[in-house]
Amino acid sequence: MSVLIYVELDNGSIKKTSLEAVAYGAKVAEKTGGPVVVLALGQADEIALQKAGNYGATKVLHAADEKLTHENSLAYADALSQAVTQENSKVIILSKSGLGDAMAARAAAKLKAGIVSGVTALPEIDATFKVKRGIFTGKAFATTEVKSDVKILVIKKNVIEIDENDVASAQATVEPFAPQLRENDFQASVISVEKANLELSLTEAQVIVSGGRGMKGPENWQPLLDLAKALGAATGCSKPVSDLDWRPHHEHIGQTGIKVAPNLYIACGISGAIQHLAGVNGSKCIVVINKDPEAPFFKSADYGIVGDVFEILPKLTEAAKKL
Ligand SMILES: Cc1cc2nc3c(=O)[nH]c(=O)nc-3n(C[C@H](O)[C@H](O)[C@H](O)COP(=O)(O)OP(=O)(O)OC[C@H]3O[C@@H](n4cnc5c(N)ncnc54)[C@H](O)[C@@H]3O)c2cc1C
């Protein structure tokens, strides 16, 4: 009986959100017993995969088949199910993403497993297995009891805090894994992927500086970019801003855009409409800068600054540079 974690790769290395999933899996295994096994699909650097050991994994199954180069949720779910059977895994963990949810749902159907997506804490394990998850776009929590033999958990970012200074120096052994791939899984295949020119991915970022219509126009974005640079932050925006082409669409945050969960979200000239909040309420700390003291965003803010964003941003940048 093992705990199995599927890790997403970026340029051959394990994504940070997936390293969190490995650390989460190691904590689960402390309660359930059994080894912590990682599954990586596609081209990867062996040394980068061994790094999963630092976060508590004992073994990494690596399927390097050329066909798995591009993400394909059908084939990936098939490979995941085969790994679960081979390793006799009872708890399967994926990090929440479009791919993670698609794989989890398909693997759950194949394995007759119970699935909980949007998990926000470690499970309570005694005679029962209970998991807490966010519902209503993070405004409430539900506790779900999973009774199936095999359980699949799709965990949200920041569920577990990792102090990089505390990670162990252990290395996981990397074993080749050759799942049987069905031609039917490749009826539609990704031929190439063009990445948006993002210096920092919004879903991975620890800090996000985001702008709304209060920025008044694309020509005024420089003070926001300066603060983002000083903080090593990614940049985001509200929907109207991307609709107006002031900023690229991949920066659109909210119910109909990207959902983010950074440690720090700084909202500049964003009113705080419910559809925007739906994408940011997983943030650990929210700072709102708005000239209107009645702006609804202040109700969800940990810190609020009432004032003109164009006066405040340069001051924050100056302070951030001193840090
Ligand atoms: C079905 C649906 C889905 C939607 N999905 C999304 C979504 O995913 N994401 C999203 O963001 N929106 C979404 N919206 C739109 C949403 O309802 C709001 O209209 C939008 O979020 C408002 O954007 P905003 O805050 O940038 O602009 P505004 O509402 O115009 O707010 C601008 C704010 O800037 C402040 N301001 C102005 N000048 C300054 C200044 N100099 N200094 C400081 N503050 C200043 C103002 O006081 C105001 O609060 C959706 C709407 C619908 C109907």
Image: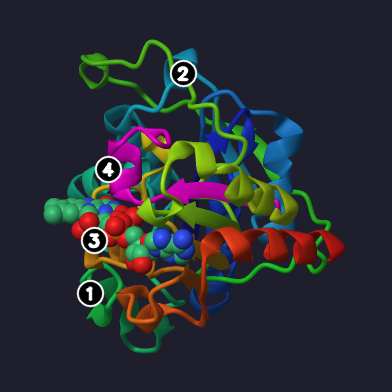
Name the residue beneath numbered marker 4.
102
Give yes or no for contact between labels 1 and 4 (Cβ–Cβ under 8 Å): no
Distance between mark 1 and mark 4 Cα atoms? 21 Å
**In the depicted view, which residue is nearer to us: 52 or 198?**
198
Distance between mark 3 and mark 2 Cα atoms? 28 Å
Does residue 268 appear anywhere in the picture?
A: no
Name the residue beneath numbered marker 1.
147
Whichever of callouts 1 and 3 sits on the residue coming sooner in the sequence is 1
In the drawing, what numbered circle is on residue 275? Answer: 3
Please name which of the two marks, 3 or 4, marks the residue nearer to the observer.
3
- 101 shown above or below 11: below
Image coordinates of residue 115 in percent, x first then y, are 25, 61
- 99 shown above or below 89: above
Q: Which three-letter amino acid code belongs to the residue tagged 4?
A: Ala
Please name which of the two marks, 1 or 3, marks the residue nearer to the observer.
3
Distance between mark 2 and mark 1 Cα atoms? 41 Å
Name the residue beneath numbered marker 2.
194
Q: Secondary structure at mark 1?
A: loop
Distance between mark 3 and mark 4 Cα atoms? 23 Å
Q: Which three-letter amino acid code belongs to the residue tagged 1?
A: Lys
263 to the left or right of 151: right
